[in-house]
Image (spheres, rainbow, N blue to C red):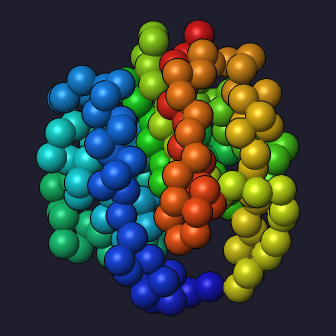
């Protein structure tokens, strides 16, 4: 899937509802690393309350966002290896980590813990279900609540795992985690 096609697909979607949930757990002015900014909609909302560093594994997305936001803090970053020496109060993603295999999701959570300050928060949304599919060369891995709890419980205390509606009833899950 090309960048322009992805941006068009993402029109009309943003993390406003999710960010309101995050605000219950994360004080204003905290540092946030957003994994997978894509077109940057959520980063723009997050910046109203937090000191945000945006990241993506696609330089094209970062370059496009930087054209309109030249002073923003951006990192070319892979969500699996998380190769950065920086630490954050929160790591946030909205429908990004479902592009990883289940094995790589486990690795990502382990690396996220390393990139968080003590008692840091991880906040992510994923698609709910039990299938794995590929669409337009993009992997989509769906998760059930219990599975996400098992994947994260070694490195994090689960503060919340809730289902919510994005396109259909209960088609999505958000999870709020605190690093152990």
Q: Image check: 2 left or right of 146?
A: left
Residue drawn at the location 52% of the way across and 52% of the way down: 164
Q: Going by the picture, which residue comes out furthest to the front?
A: 169
Residue 87, position as x, y percentages in the image:
42, 25
As displayed, is residue 155 above or below residue 39? above
* Of the pair 149 and 84, the residue shown nearer to us: 149
Q: Report x, y in % for residue 124.
A: 53, 43
Q: Residue at x 72, y 29 (%)?
A: 149
Tell me if 3 is positioned left or right of 25 in this view: right
In this rendering, does residue 23 appear at all? yes
Q: Quadrant of the N terminus?
A: bottom right
State the residue at coordinates (53%, 71%): 167
Report whether 93 appears left or right of 153: left
Decide if residue 107 is in sight here: no
Q: Residue 151 at x, y = what percent?
A: 77, 31
Q: Could you tell me residue 62's position as x and y percent? A: 38, 65
Residue situated in front as seen by the camera: 161 or 126: 161
- Quadrant assignment for the C terminus: top right
Instruction: Residue 156: name its quadrant.
Output: top right
Position of 54 relative to 49 (above/below): below
Q: Count the marks.
A: 0
Residue at 75% across / 45% down in the picture?
144
Q: Is residue 164 above or below residue 156?
A: below
- Give whichever of 84, 54 is nearer the camera: 54
């Amino acid at each position: 899937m090309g960048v322009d096609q992805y941006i068009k697909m993402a029109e009309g979607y943003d993390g406003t509802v999710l960010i309101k949930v995050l605000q219950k757990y994360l004080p204003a002015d905290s540092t946030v690393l957003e994994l997978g900014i894509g077109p940057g909609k959520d980063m723009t909302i997050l910046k109203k309350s937090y000191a945000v560093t945006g990241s993506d594994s696609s330089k094209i997305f970062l370059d496009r966002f930087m054209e309109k936001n030249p002073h923003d803090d951006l990192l070319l970053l892979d969500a699996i290896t998380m190769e950065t020496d920086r630490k954050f109060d929160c790591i946030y993603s909205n429908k990004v980590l479902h592009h990883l295999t289940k094995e790589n999701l486990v690795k990502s959570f382990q690396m996220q813990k390393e990139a968080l300050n003590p008692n840091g928060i991880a906040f992510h949304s994923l698609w709910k279900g039990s299938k794995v599919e590929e669409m337009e060369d993009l992997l989509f891995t769906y998760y059930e609540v219990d599975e996400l709890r098992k994947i994260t419980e070694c490195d994090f205390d689960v503060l919340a795992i809730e289902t919510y509606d994005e396109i259909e009833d209960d088609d999505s899950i958000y999870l709020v985690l605190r690093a152990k």
